């Protein structure tokens, strides 16, 4: 509700209808995270599956719906409002786009500090680092595609893949999953920032200017 | 001033009058216009020029506040009521202080999650629900769905309330 209210108050409700490069083309831009999601899902189901039976279908559907709604709400706030505001501030020049991506990513990571209320601090810190680098990449995809629903889909799919065992078998809660994050999560900085370098390469910056040049004053 | 609202107004004032715009009847000194659909829906007249002038004057005093006014109408004259509320004017703040705005947006978002969580927990306690048997994903989904319910059922603001910039957007 707050996400929608903020969008309305900043006159950005139109971004819910903005096509940008289109959803399917956006999927091509977001092919790397899609591959990563597939890899995580297959790996989890193949090697981490517990012996307990699957949860009833309604509970699995609730888990999926919850992850989708969380993805929508977070994307509306962190990409639709925060990243776009920063892009409007910094402009569509290369440095401006990078600044907007990095600052919005840091804010996205900082938002996960709220998990300190229920999880182990070190796990939350690792989650923040992971989320910050993911936030940078999602912002880059949003700027490249001009379509918010692409990042909503990727974000929701990533959440589902990350919480898959808990959602399908009910063996672990979100708080327990976060508490289990170790230092290997630091690798995510490279895993997400290297593709971001590729996404925002010099050759592709005209695409960002095409979708955002009309809104942003350089 | 162009009328962007697509609704046609009363029977006498069709598109040939610019979609129900006519001269303001509040007095010979006013060159403003009012829109008759306001009269039909809210039983009040809104003289756009006067509303805009008043809103701009108030906004000048409080650049970071968007002021909501309820306009009482008496004998086709607009009288700003004493009921006035200020809410943060997000758009102005976003342009003037983008970083501050982003941090505030994040804080408001997280605070809303916390408050909703608290309200739902209190509601569950009041209904004497068994916390051990509650599906945490269902619990969280209900919190999220509440926002979408509000978006589709309660949007826009209740009739009779006019936002200063919202009023400008209406025409």
Image: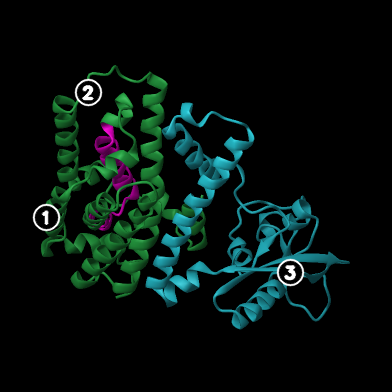
Chain colours: A green, B cyan
Residue B30 on the magenta span: no
Closer to the chain start, of discs 2 and 1, is: 2
Q: Is residue B96 above or below residue A193?
A: below
Mark 2 or mark 3, whichever is nearer to me: 2
Query: SS for tag 3?
Result: loop
Whole-number angstrom distance, CA of label 2 to CA of label 3: 68 Å
Q: Secondary structure at mark 2?
A: loop
Q: Residue at x 51, y 45 (%)?
A: B117
* Badge 3 density bin: few <14, some 14–19, many ≥20, Cα 10 Å: many
CA gap, disc 3 and disc 1: 59 Å
* Residue located at (38% from left, 54% from top): A114
Marks 2/1: CA distance?
A: 30 Å
Q: Do marks 2 and 3 share a subunit?
A: no
Taking A202 as reference, is A208 left or right?
A: right
Q: Which range of residues does the magenta coloring cover?
A: A138-164
Which residue appears at 27% of the width and 19% of the height?
A52
Question: Which structural element holds mark 1?
Answer: helix
Q: Main secondary structure of the magenta part?
A: helix
Residue at numbered disc 1: A190
Crowding at dot 2, Cα within 10 Å, few <14 / some 14-19 / many 20+, comes out as few
Discs 2, 1: same chain: yes
Q: Quadrant of the C terminus of chain A?
A: bottom left
Q: Is residue A213 above or below residue A183?
A: below
| Of the pair A174 and A31, the residue shown nearer to us | A174
Q: Is disc 1 surrounded by few (<14), some (14 to 19) or many (20+) residues within 10 Å?
A: few
Residue A54 percent across, percent down from the top left? 30, 19
Instruction: Say whether residue A128 is left or right of residue A117.
Output: left
Q: Is residue A159 magenta?
A: yes
* Residue carrying label 2: A50
Q: Chain of mark 2?
A: A
The circle on residue B47 is: 3
Of the two numbered discs 2 and 1 in the rendering, the one whose residue sits closer to the viewer: 2
């Amino acid at each position: 509700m707050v996400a929608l209210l903020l969008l309305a108050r900043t006159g950005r409700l139109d971004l819910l209808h903005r096509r940008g490069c289109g959803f399917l083309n956006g999927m091509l831009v977001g092919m790397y995270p899609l591959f990563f999601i597939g890899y995580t899902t297959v790996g989890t189901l193949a090697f981490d599956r517990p012996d307990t039976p699957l949860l009833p279908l309604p509970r699995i559907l609730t888990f999926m719906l919850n992850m989708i709604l969380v993805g929508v709400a977070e994307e509306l706030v962190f990409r639709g409002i925060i990243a776009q505001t920063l892009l409007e501030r910094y402009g569509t020049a290369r440095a401006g786009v990078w600044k907007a991506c990095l600052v919005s990513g840091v804010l996205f990571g900082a938002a996960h500090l709220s998990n300190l209320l229920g999880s182990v601090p070190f796990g939350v810190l690792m989650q923040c680092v992971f989320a910050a680098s993911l936030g940078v990449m999602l912002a880059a995809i949003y700027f490249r595609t001009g379509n918010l629903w692409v990042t909503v889909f990727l974000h929701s799919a990533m959440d589902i893949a990350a919480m898959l065992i808990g959602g399908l078998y009910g063996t672990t809660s979100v708080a327990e999953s976060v508490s289990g994050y170790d230092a290997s999560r630091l690798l995510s900085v490279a895993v997400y920032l290297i593709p971001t370098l590729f996404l925002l390469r010099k050759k592709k910056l005209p695409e960002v200017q095409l979708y955002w040049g009309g809104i942003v004053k350089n | 001033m162009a009328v962007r609202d697509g609704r046609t107004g009363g029977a006498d004032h069709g598109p040939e009058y610019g979609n129900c715009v006519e001269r303001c009847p509040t007095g010979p000194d006013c060159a403003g216009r009012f829109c008759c659909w306001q009269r039909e829906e809210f039983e009040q007249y809104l003289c756009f020029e006067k509303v805009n002038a008043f809103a701009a004057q108030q906004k000048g005093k409080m650049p970071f506040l968007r002021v909501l006014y309820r306009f009482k109408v008496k004998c086709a004259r607009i009288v700003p009521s004493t009921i006035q509320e200020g809410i943060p004017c997000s758009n102005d703040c976003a342009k003037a202080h983008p970083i501050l705005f982003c941090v505030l947006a994040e804080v408001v978002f997280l605070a809303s999650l916390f408050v909703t969580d608290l309200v739902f927990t209190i509601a569950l306690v009041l209904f004497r629900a068994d916390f051990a048997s509650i599906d945490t994903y269902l619990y969280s989904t209900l919190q999220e769905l509440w926002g979408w319910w509000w978006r589709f059922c309660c949007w826009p603001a209740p009739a009779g309330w006019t936002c200063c910039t919202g009023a400008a957007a209406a025409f």
